[in-house]
Image (cartoon, rainbow, N blue to C red):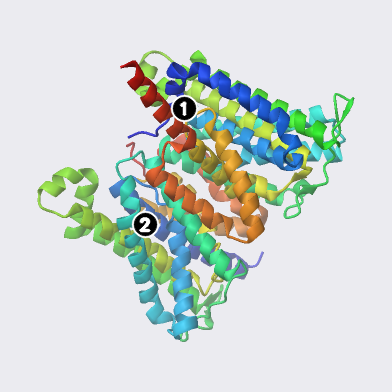
């Protein structure tokens, strides 16, 4: 059995209108949330959710599981933080610098990693990310263990002061929402269909004349760029870029978010990120070892719950609907 | 640059290389049989070191008995996990196997970090192997010489067992076609469990051997695992001998770079991996599967 990413086509065919309802509800929650929950926590959550969406773009599109996505998240975070703090870049430019870095790293890593698929692809991305980690440990501007702290948020377009938490939150929310729609758009485009076809039967797509490697590379770079958006935004919103951002634990965390929410579902990574980030916050507060709990959830999901939360929901919804039709 | 320092680093590189070889050998055996990359291999390495340390700390058992007992403990624990949990994903996409063992890795490492912290416990050189000899061109600590000899014997012993014995022939046959081997009346699931035990025991031995050189640290498995993954990608999964040679050579190369350009020593193996992937994507000894 291949990786179960059938949720995409299922949500496409049968619950299209329902999806728009879900998106609309999501947008309302996005607008109302900072009045109920501490905005800084929400910003972190949104950045991780966007990061999870970027990972989902890669695995949902081509079935490629990256074990080193933190490299692009953290790479973006470091450069955005450095340019905003040391070079006085305004918010937009710092973001762009971070995203450009992540895109560049993604292009290099992609050119190397897409030469293999499956397990070896995962191991190669892990090793490449480790190389980036060592780089971040060694380069002077990253201040190794301390990281880059107290990054100024600056002004949005020179008019809105982002030191205001509410303003910063709505910027995060807007970028997250656009990112989500982008992933959705890519998936439902002919480009996304070709990617899924490559995943299902690569030799056939080659014989049909599709430049398979180029498709995979473009998707990889796109995913890395989006991870860079998430990382840069996080660095500026929370004012912090540290080694944790490029660490393997971050790469593993994003895998968990997507698995928990549901591989190959659009909403899954968002749900997974909400649960994982909230859980981290809660567990750290009561002194339970977080990695152990994360490991247990990993094992549990893979043994009994492979569709993830949103995936299970869509599965039963589809069964219910098709029964109603028959 | 003194010759002493050069040869000292080369020796350490050779030792690291033999650890890489033992861990990637275990990975290659399990991968060959099950198609699963066992991400928990690093945890078994750490467990080997910790079991030896615990045997000494709580039961007063010394290095030599521990060198046997700790890997047996690791193997039993590994086989228990294989029988109860890991076997459930054999029929799924192998990425699930990687994710599952990654979860197991996080649980095991997380628990030891929780219990023992990240500072590391010292483990003394065994009596009889303290001190060292001056070979003229370098100072050779006895224990390190022993580690090199022991791991080389173990690696090539494993190679011999797999390539030259009857049990090894069953194992290779089961790798090629498990259904057919089963129809000959050979208990393939048992064979798989034993091979899994053997694979993780290799990591356990490496852990015990490493304990007196490095401290016994809960995080020691994670650091080596990623390097071993890169080693496996470079060598390819095709051949047992290939994993051994790749591990040793890369360890020595890493040692070399520590002498000439210490800042980059962590990166050398990854850089080699990139070059190999560009030139020969299936790895130096790999077969396309």
> Could one spot residue A107 in this view of the protein?
yes
- Picture layout, residue A169 above or below residue B7: above
**Residue to which mark 1 is pinned:** A62
- How packed mark 1 is, by other alpha carbons closer than 10 Å (few <14, some 14-19, many 20 or more), is many
Q: In the rendered image of this protein, does residue A247 appear above or below residue A262?
A: below
Residue B164, position as x, y percentages in the image: 21, 58
Where residue B192 appears, as percent x and y from the top left, is: 26, 54
Residue plotted at (38% across, 44% down): A304
Q: Chain of mark 2?
A: B
Residue B7 visible in the picture = no
Q: Please name whichever residue, B72 or B234, is drawn nearer the observer in this view of the structure.
A: B72
The answer to whether residue A35 is above or below residue B161 is above
Q: Is residue A304 positioned above or below B24 on the image?
A: above
The one nearer the camera, A168 or A226, is: A168
Q: Are marks 1 and 2 on the same chain?
A: no
Q: SS for tag 2?
A: helix
Q: CA distance from mark 1 to mark 2?
A: 30 Å
Q: Nearer the viewer, mark 1 or mark 2?
A: 1
- Residue where numbered disc 2 is placed: B26
Q: Position of residue A249 (x, y in %)?
A: 58, 49
Residue, x 60% and y 40% (percent of image)?
A274
Q: Which mark is residue A208?
A: none
Residue ranking furthest to the left: B184
User: In which chain is the residue bearing label 1?
Assistant: A
Give the class, few, some or many, for how many residues have Cα within 10 Å of label 2's Cα (few <14, many ≥20). Answer: many
The N terminus of chain B, quarter of image: bottom right
Mark 1 lies on a secondary structure that is helix
């Amino acid at each position: 059995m291949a990786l179960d990413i059938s949720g995409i086509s299922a949500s496409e065919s049968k619950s299209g209108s329902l999806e728009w309802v879900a998106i609309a509800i999501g947008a309302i929650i996005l607008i109302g949330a900072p009045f109920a929950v501490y905005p800084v926590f929400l910003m972190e959550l949104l950045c991780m959710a966007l990061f999870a969406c970027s990972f989902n773009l890669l695995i949902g599109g081509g079935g490629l599981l990256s074990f080193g996505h933190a490299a692009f998240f953290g790479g973006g975070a470091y450069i955005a933080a450095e340019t905003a703090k040391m070079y006085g870049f305004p918010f937009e430019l710092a973001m762009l610098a971070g995203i450009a870095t992540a895109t560049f790293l993604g292009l290099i890593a992609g050119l190397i990693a897409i030469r293999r698929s499956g397990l070896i692809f995962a191991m190669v991305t892990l090793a490449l990310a480790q190389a980036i980690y060592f780089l971040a440990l060694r380069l002077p501007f990253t201040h190794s263990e301390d990281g880059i702290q107290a990054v100024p948020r600056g002004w949005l377009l020179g008019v809105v002061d982002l030191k205001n938490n509410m303003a910063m939150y709505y910027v995060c929310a807007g970028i997250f929402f656009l990112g989500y729609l982008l992933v959705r758009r890519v998936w439902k485009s002919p480009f996304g269909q070709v990617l899924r076809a490559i995943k299902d039967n690569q030799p056939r797509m080659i014989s049909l004349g599709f430049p398979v490697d180029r498709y995979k590379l473009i998707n990889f770079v796109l995913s890395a760029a989006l991870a860079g958006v998430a990382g840069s935004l996080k660095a500026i919103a929370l004012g912090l870029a540290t080694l944790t951002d490029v660490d393997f634990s971050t790469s593993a965390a994003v895998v968990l978010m997507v698995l928990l929410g549901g591989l190959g579902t659009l909403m899954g990574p968002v749900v997974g990120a909400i649960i994982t980030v909230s859980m981290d916050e809660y567990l750290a507060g009561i002194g339970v070892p977080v990695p152990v709990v994360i490991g247990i959830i990993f094992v549990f999901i893979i043994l009994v719950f492979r569709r993830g939360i949103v995936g299970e929901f869509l599965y039963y919804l589809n069964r219910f609907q098709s029964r109603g039709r028959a | 640059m003194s010759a002493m320092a050069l040869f000292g680093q080369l020796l350490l590189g050779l030792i690291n290389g033999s650890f890489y070889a033992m861990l990637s050998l275990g990975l290659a055996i399990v991968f060959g049989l099950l198609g699963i990359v066992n991400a928990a291999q690093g945890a078994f390495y750490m467990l080997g070191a910790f079991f030896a340390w615990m045997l000494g700390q709580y039961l007063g058992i010394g290095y030599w008995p521990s060198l046997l007992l700790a890997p047996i403990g690791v193997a039993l624990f590994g086989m228990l996990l294989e029988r109860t949990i890991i076997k459930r994903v054999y029929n799924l996409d192998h990425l699930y196997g990687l994710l599952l063992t990654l979860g197991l890795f996080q649980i095991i490492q997380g628990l030891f970090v929780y219990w023992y912290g990240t500072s590391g416990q010292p483990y003394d050189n065994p009596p009889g192997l303290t001190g060292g000899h001056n070979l003229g061109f370098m100072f050779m600590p006895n224990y390190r010489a022993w580690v090199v000899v022991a791991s080389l014997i173990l690696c090539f012993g494993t190679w011999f067992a797999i390539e030259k014995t009857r049990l090894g022939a069953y194992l290779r046959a089961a790798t090629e076609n498990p259904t057919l081997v089963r129809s000959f009346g050979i208990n393939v699931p048992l064979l798989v469990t034993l091979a899994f035990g053997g694979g993780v025991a290799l990591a356990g031995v490496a852990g015990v051997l490493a304990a007196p050189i490095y401290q016994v640290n809960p995080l020691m498995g994670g650091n080596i695992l990623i390097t071993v993954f890169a080693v496996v990608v470079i060598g390819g999964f095709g051949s047992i001998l290939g994993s051994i040679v790749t591990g040793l050579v890369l360890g020595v190369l890493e040692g070399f770079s520590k002498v000439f350009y210490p800042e980059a020593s962590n990166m050398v193996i990854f850089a080699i991996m990139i070059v190999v992937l560009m030139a020969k994507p299936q790895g130096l000894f790999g077969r396309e599967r």
